[in-house]
Amino acid sequence: MKDIFDTNVLCNKCNIKTNKAAILKDGFRLRYFECPKCTQRWYHPSDIKEYEEFKILKQRIFSVKLRMVGNSFSVTIPREIIEFEERFTQLEKEIDQIMRLSLDEPGKICLYFKKDLEEENGKER
């Protein structure tokens, strides 16, 4: 199926061909068309939909169980979080996959399913 971002779009006010661009917002790449004359933006509908779903999920507070397994503890991760991104659904098949876990501050543990942008640029946290 063709994507709307693969076409040329004209500004409805200026009747000028728009430029394609993208911004990074909360870790999401939001693609948009922008008129070079009036600077009006039209965001890609599927990018906006995914970002809105993320914002709703981010506002939820999940109650999870902490269990003792041998000398370690395990935490259950709600299915909504795992299923949020399509690539995370493969975690069910690759349960033993190594992920990053860090103690960010007292009372706050972070679990990273993917590399940070800083790591991808060659910088370690």
Image: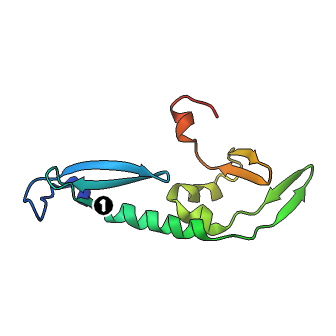
Q: Is residue 2 visible?
A: no
Instruction: Give the residue at the far front of this rendering.
Output: 38
Quadrant of the rendering where the N terminus is positioned: bottom left
Residue at the image position 51 percent from the left and 66 percent from the top: 55
Q: Is residue 18 left or right of residue 78?
A: left
Q: Is residue 43 visible?
A: yes
Percent position (x, y) of residue 77?
Answer: 70, 63
Viewer-proximal residue, 102 or 40? 40
Instruction: Give the residue at the far right of this rendering.
Output: 71
Viewer-proximal residue, 59 or 54? 59
Residue at the image position 70 percent from the left and 70 percent from the top: 62
CA neighbours of label 1 inside 10 A, class few (<14), some (14 to 19), many (20+)? some
Percent position (x, y) of residue 29?
Answer: 41, 51
Residue at the image position 57 percent from the left and 41 percent from the top: 116
Query: Which residue lies under the disc numbered 1?
Result: 43
Q: Is residue 15 left or right of residue 43?
A: left
